[in-house]
Image (cartoon, rainbow, N blue to C red):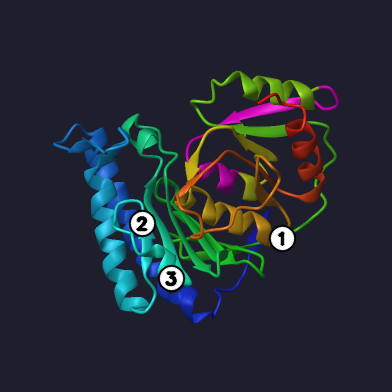
């Protein structure tokens, strides 16, 4: 739950918000042009995943702005060179368009992910949702904010006792066809009814902040820029994101930028349910 609050006075937040609002507007305009059938370039990367002109345009804008704002902090971005990353004790982690496939399929569940990494931990997180004109942001040690960049209004996460319900809301990607997901859900259903909620990209993390998803299992690989912001935001409200061996992800330290699968949960109660079910999935 988010409740109305005053704008934070933190200098980093005040500097980043207009930059990410502009990036969101750029991305939304690209999406509207694409949906309208105007000329639009989509290429294929070496891993056969798609990259669009929107990815590249937003990436260029954000790299330029971050270089001005924090010239001493390098950026790990999905669409840029990060070959020197192991030399960096601090860096930004950026995905200029998380949910490229959602974008291409004209589903509006795509985001911009930005996080600040220090000593392998996410200390600041931001997820912007261009089609909803909002962003979720905050520090690991504080409750996160929600900002509407059209209404210019601020809200802050508020912990409260929710209405009693037995249903567990499980977030799934639109492409979650692996039978392990069914096995995972069936185990939870032994004790609790399950509501399945399908959504794309890091948008599911935003739904978790809004109380619309309790547990989010992911049994196929992701990259660090897919999870860093979401993990930071969930940890700031008492939830978390862990590997399939139940260890929290750390960042910019492994040889590969790829993550294995993960389990995300919005609070300690759902953590217990999520990990118990994980222990009963056959891998």
Distance (Cα) linking label 1 and label 2: 32 Å
Residue at the image position 73 percent from the left and 57 percent from the top: 238
Between 240 and 247, the residue placed more toward the observer is 247
- Asked if 148 appears above or below 119 in the picture, the reply is above
Tell me the SS state at disc 2.
strand
The disc placed on residue 77 is 2
Q: Quadrant of residue 187?
A: top right
Residue numbers of the magenta segment? 190-207
Q: Earlier in the sequence, mark 1 or mark 2?
A: 2
Q: Are marks 1 and 2 in contact (CB under 8 Å)?
A: no
Tell me the SS state at disc 3.
loop
Determine if the magenta segment contains residue 124.
no
How far from the left and from the top, in percent, is residue 3? 66, 61
Residue at the image position 21 percent from the left and 37 percent from the top: 43
Which residue position holds label 1?
158
How far from the left and from the top, in percent, is residue 77? 36, 56
Q: Choose mark 3 or mark 1, whichever is in front.
A: 3
Q: Earlier in the sequence, mark 3 or mark 1?
A: 3
Q: Quadrant of residue 197?
A: top right
Tell me the SS state at disc 1.
loop
How far from the left and from the top, in percent, is residue 83? 33, 59
Q: Residues within 10 Å of mark 1 (few under 14, many from 20)?
A: some
Q: Are marks 3 and 2 in contact (CB under 8 Å)?
A: no
Which residue position holds label 3?
88
Residue at the image position 76 percent from the left and 44 percent from the top: 271
Residue lying at the far front of the rendered structure = 255
How far from the left and from the top, in percent, is residue 159? 76, 58
């Amino acid at each position: 739950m988010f409740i109305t609050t005053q704008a934070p006075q933190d200098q980093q937040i005040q500097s980043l918000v207009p930059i990410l609002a502009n990036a969101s507007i750029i991305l939304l305009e690209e999406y509207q042009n694409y949906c309208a059938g105007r000329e639009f370039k989509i290429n294929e990367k070496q891993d056969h995943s798609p990259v669009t002109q929107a990815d590249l345009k937003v990436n260029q804008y954000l790299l330029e702005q971050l270089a001005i704002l924090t010239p001493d902090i390098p950026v790990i971005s999905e669409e840029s060179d990060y070959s020197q990353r192991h030399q960096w004790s601090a860096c930004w982690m950026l995905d200029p368009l998380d949910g490229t496939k959602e974008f291409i399929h004209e589903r509006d569940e795509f985001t911009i992910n930005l996080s600040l990494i220090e000593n392998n931990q996410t200390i600041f997180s931001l997820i912007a949702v261009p089609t909803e004109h909002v962003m979720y942001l905050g520090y690991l040690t504080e409750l996160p904010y929600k900002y509407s960049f059209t209404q210019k209004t601020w809200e802050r996460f508020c912990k409260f006792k929710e209405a009693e319900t037995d249903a567990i809301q499980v977030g799934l990607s639109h492409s979650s066809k692996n039978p392990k997901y069914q096995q995972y859900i069936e185990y939870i259903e032994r004790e609790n009814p399950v509501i399945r909620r399908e959504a794309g990209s890091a948008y599911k993390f935003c739904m978790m902040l809004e109380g619309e998803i309790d547990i989010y299992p992911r049994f196929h690989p992701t990259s660090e820029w897919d999870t860093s912001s979401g993990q930071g935001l969930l940890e700031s409200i008492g939830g978390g994101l862990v590997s399939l061996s139940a260890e929290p992800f750390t960042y910019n330290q492994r040889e590969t930028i790829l993550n294995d699968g993960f389990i995300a949960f919005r609070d300690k109660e759902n953590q217990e349910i999520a990990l118990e079910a994980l222990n009963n999935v056959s891998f």
